[in-house]
Amino acid sequence: VSQSRYVRKPVSNVTIHNVVKKYSEYGVHENRRLSAKNLISKGVDISTVSKVLNHTSLATTTRYIRIEDSELMNTLRGI
């Protein structure tokens, strides 16, 4: 049985950071924040978003997504 020339390794945080930096106009944390805000705007509850972000506290998630008053008002208008 021959072994593959390529060994699969987990992707490192540095590699992820470099890929995001190369292909995105935003940094890693800004992309996480924008993704979280997008999930919230799609109706995903904040506790699920908190788990996705691996936050131990909902307070951290709340600060992280920084929903602005104008966005909140637009959301409430749609209800």
Image: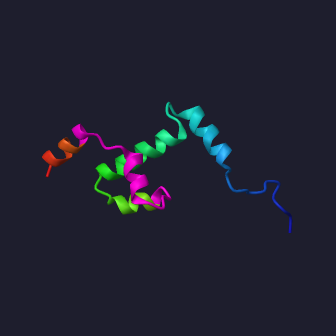
Q: Is residue 56 magenta?
A: yes
Q: Position of residue 71 (x, y in %)?
A: 25, 40
Residue 45 image-quadrant placement:
bottom left
**What residue is shown at x 79% (from left), y 54% (from top)?**
6
> How is the rendered protein coloured?
rainbow
Q: Quadrant of the N terminus?
A: bottom right
Measuring from the top left, give residue 40's x and y in whole percent: 32, 52
- Residue 41 spot, x, y in % from top left: 29, 49
* Magenta residues (range): 52-71
**Magenta residues: mostly which secondary structure?**
helix
* 4 vs 23: above or below: below
Kindly indicate the quadrant of the structure image that contains residue 48.
bottom left
Work out whether residue 31 or residue 2 is closer to the camera in this orientation and state it: 31
Query: Left of 22 or right of it: where is 76?
Result: left
Q: Give the farthest residue toward the right.
A: 2
In the image, what residue occupies the spot 55% across and 34% down? Answer: 23
Residue drawn at 28 percent across, 56 percent down: 43
Name, please, the residue furthest toward the top.
25
Could you tell whether 56 is left or right of 47 in the image?
right
| Residue 8 highlighted magenta (yes or no) | no
Query: Does residue 19 lie above or below 76 as drawn?
Result: above
Q: Is 40 placed left or right of 76 in the picture? A: right
Q: Who's the residue at 64% across and 38% down the image?
A: 18
The location of residue 11, given as percent across then percent down, is 67, 52
Q: How many marks?
A: 0
Instruction: Decide if residue 5 is on the left or right side of residue 72.
Output: right
